[in-house]
Image (spheres, helix red, strand yellow):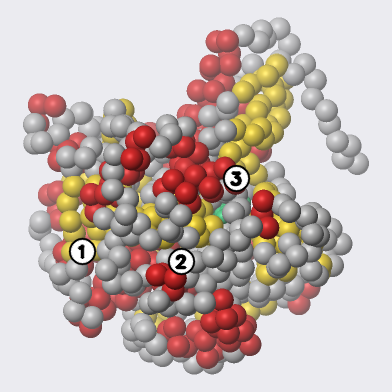
Amino acid sequence: MVVPGSQHAEDKMYHPPEGLQKDAHVPDFNCYLELYKKSIEEPDVFWKEVASDFYWKKPPTGHVLQYNFDVTKGNIYVKCMEGAKTNMCYNVLDRNVKDKNLGERVAFYWEGNSPDHHVAITYSQLLGQVCRCANVLKQMGVRKGDRVAIYLPMIPELVYTMLACARIGAVHSIVFAGFSSESLCERILDSQCSILVTADGVYRGEKWINLKQIADEALEKCKEKASATVKRCLVVKHHALRIKSGDVSNEPQTPWDAACDVCWEEVMGQVSEQCEPEWLDAEDPLFILYTSGSTGKPKGVLHTVAGYLLYTSLTFKYVFDHQPDDVYWCTADIGWITGHSYITYGPLANGATSVLFEGIPVHPHVGRFWEVIEKYRVTKFYTAPTAIRLLMKYGKEPLQKYDLSSLRILGTVGEPINPEAWHWYYEVVGQKRCPVVDTFWQTETGGHVLTPLPAATPLKPGSATFPFFGVDPTILNEHGEELEGEAEGYLVFRRPWPGIMRTVYGNQERFENTYFKKFPGFYVTGDGCRRDKDGYYWITGRIDDMINVSGHLLSTAEVESSLTDHGAVAEAAVVSRPHAVKGECLYCFVTLKDCREFNRTLVDELKRQVREKIGPIATPDFIQNAPGLPKTRSD
Ligand code: PRX
């Protein structure tokens, strides 16, 4: 709690620079308040204005948002732009190329793992590649409504494939290319994907990861567990070759099964660059993205076409105050929601020019981020607190070698940002010229829900400040009572905004139980939150069995179950421990079966087991022998 009148560091406000306010979309706090009021009091008027920027094959009928958030009154549902027909891909590509004449504008500067590998892709080129990919998918039998699993690194083909799905009405399910074969298999089976799109592999720093082999293992596991759903595998076969300067003798071996595998490089040249978009209902599904669930099994979060389009485009425009001369860079991987909303859909819907980065922050040197900012004259930069803390460790020197004067706005996402990291970001990276937009949101929310607007909101380091337009937050106590003024409790939302998830794929009951059952009438985020005397919101962290490691949510139950799968382990309990770079890390207690010995070898085996079952992000930092674990009574 804030003690009224105390001189907390958090009370210090950082005001937007005047230079930024001049041409900003939302130039001051009063303007934010007026627009916010309109979005809450007249949502139809507000969202119809936003929608008028886009192409609708058929305009909507009725209210923009229809919903039920109260489980006691029936099924939970949200509908946006009911009756309308549109296409996401048309709106983010054709509309820019044909209606706005932006065909020659660069959509992406792709920057590879090594600084020698880069390519610029214009909006016209992007449209052509997306149409080709859409035709390839159609040839492979993909139809409207089919699910397509995508297991690709950060290469342009990832964007081509997701937009190709959006064009033909297929539902993409992107699996982060750092996940294990087991995790990929689980996701493929849950959403019954008919096609898998992958690549030969990827370099992470110096290390070659053979993605095709992992993908093959996943498909084998799918066959063992169920009648396999995936019939064909589209493979970007020569990514390694492309970045190895054409030296075939050096190309890593890619396992190949001619009966199932289709070579991307071969088929893309054989199809047309034209493909009519499929006109979809506003509420048709756009994609599924899995996020950790507290029971251990990941949840397939489902987003739909029209609402997600409106919400990601508007949040991108306002939160990064998008201007036509911007070069924007979000360092996330498209395998996470941040990449879906703020590398692909939001920026493209605004005709933005972005950097698409395959690499990691410390390869080939620790100044890599700063080098990329200088190279492309990046104006808006969006990253995670964990990356900031990692780079802080190397001090100011690596930054001082580069010209960062192009930067105008800095963003952060994924976890609470500690004051030390905030100040370093603001003072050292942004040289006190650039507001830091601390954006709070979730896979489920589709886009930012609590966030400053850079030219309008006075900042307090560590606070995600105020709700975005259309978002109606409140704080509840354990009994579900709304708390006014300064308060701390459960962060919930009273009503939907266009970008909120629609269901858990194939499991409406889980959707209602997870997000709506505890407090009928509200969407429950699972986060704790405090409101200070000035009305600022401060996220205090998860209040369920989820641990946020480097900005990635992990379920303690999922890690516990991969530990107990080991023959030596009788029971396991996983808790969070603070970590200087990752924010939180996994501390695991294991109770061994009789006559098993706890030693270094076993610890290494257990760590490897979790890596293999879930993926490297879930590797435990600590494993401790616990001859007995405390139990809660469950009677
Ligand atoms: O706990 C919150 C934290 O990340 C969770 C959502 O994780 P995920 O669905 O993987 O999406 C991450 C990227 C949007 C939230 O429930 N979180 C996210 N952003 C912030 C945050 N915690 C504090 N401050 C943030 N800005």
Kindly identify the amino acid type of the residue bearing the numbered disc 1. Val
What residue is at 20 percent from the left and 74 percent from the top? 102
Q: Is disc 2 surrounded by few (<14), some (14 to 19) or many (20+) residues within 10 Å? A: some
What residue is at 58 percent from the left and 84 percent from the top? 34
Question: Which residue is identified by label 2?
Answer: 17
Mark 3 and mark 1 residues within 8 Å of each other at the beta carbon: no
Question: Which residue is identified by label 3?
Answer: 418
Q: Nearer the viewer, residue 383 or 410?
A: 410
Q: Earlier in the sequence, mark 3 or mark 2?
A: 2
Question: Which residue is identified by label 1?
Answer: 106
Q: Position of residue 262 (x, y in %)?
A: 21, 47
Q: Is disc 3 surrounded by few (<14), some (14 to 19) or many (20+) residues within 10 Å? A: some
What residue is at 59 percent from the left and 54 percent from the top? 461
Which label lies toward us, 3 or 2?
2
Separation of residues labelled 3 and 2 (CA atoms): 23 Å
Q: Is residue 177 above or below residue 394?
A: below
Kindly identify the amino acid type of the residue bearing the numbered disc 3. Asn
Q: Position of residue 360 (x, y in %)?
A: 35, 38
Separation of residues labelled 2 and 1 (CA atoms): 28 Å
Q: Say which element carries label 2.
A: loop
Q: Earlier in the sequence, mark 3 or mark 1?
A: 1
Mark number displayed over residue 532: none
Does the residue tagged 1 have its C-beta within 8 Å of any atom of ligand 1? no
Q: Say which element carries label 1.
A: strand
Q: Is residue 353 above or below residue 192?
A: below
Count of numbered badges drawn on the protein: 3
Q: Quadrant of the N terminus?
A: bottom right
